[in-house]
Amino acid sequence: MTNKNHEFLTNNTSLAAYLISEGYDLLIIRYEETPRGKIIGTFAFGEDPQMQSVIKNFNLMNAPGDIVRYEHARRNLVERVLRGLS
């Protein structure tokens, strides 16, 4: 999802980790509380013309890359969301 600030936004942690492992910079994590009290993190990336192709491959389960780098990024994002860090 994109917004008027030319950012790509997602609350999919796996996709965010994949984008990071592919070299895209995470700008910020925005948090919101659901009515049930659960905190949801939305990951904001600067929009890049090639990013849509990377996202499409991810969604088609055709996302080549470095699994160690991906796993490190995923764990880091989960930790940040759990701690409420931007």
Image: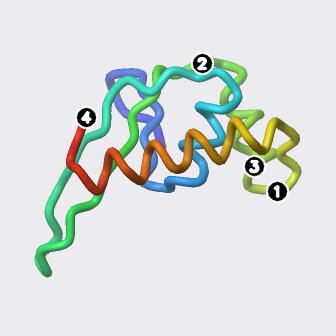
Q: Amino acid at mark 1?
A: Leu
Question: How far apart are the two marked residues, 1 and 4, measured between alpha carbons?
Answer: 29 Å
> Would you say the residues marked 3 and 1 are in contact, meaning their CB atoms lie under 8 Å apart?
yes
**Left or right: residue 36 compared with residue 40:** left
SS of the residue at dot 3? Answer: helix
Task: Look at label 3 and name its amino acid.
Answer: Phe
Instruction: Tell me whether the residue at label 4 lies in contact with that at label 3, contact meaning CB atoms closer than 8 angstroms.
Output: no
The image quadrant that residue 3 belongs to is top left
Q: Which residue is mark 4?
A: 86
Q: Which residue is mark 3?
A: 58
Distance between the Cα atoms at labels 3 and 2? 16 Å
Give the amino acid type for the residue marked by disc 4 in the picture.
Ser
- Please state the horizontal and vertical placement of residue 62, each as a whole percent of the image: 88, 50
Toward the viewer: 5 or 77?
77
Local SS, label 1 = loop
Eyeballing the image, is 29 above or below 71? above
Label for residue 60?
1
* Residue tagged 2: 48
- Where residue 71 appears, x then y in whole percent? 65, 47
- In the image, what residue occupies the spot 66% across and 28% down? 51
- Gap between marks 3 and 1 measured at Cα: 5 Å
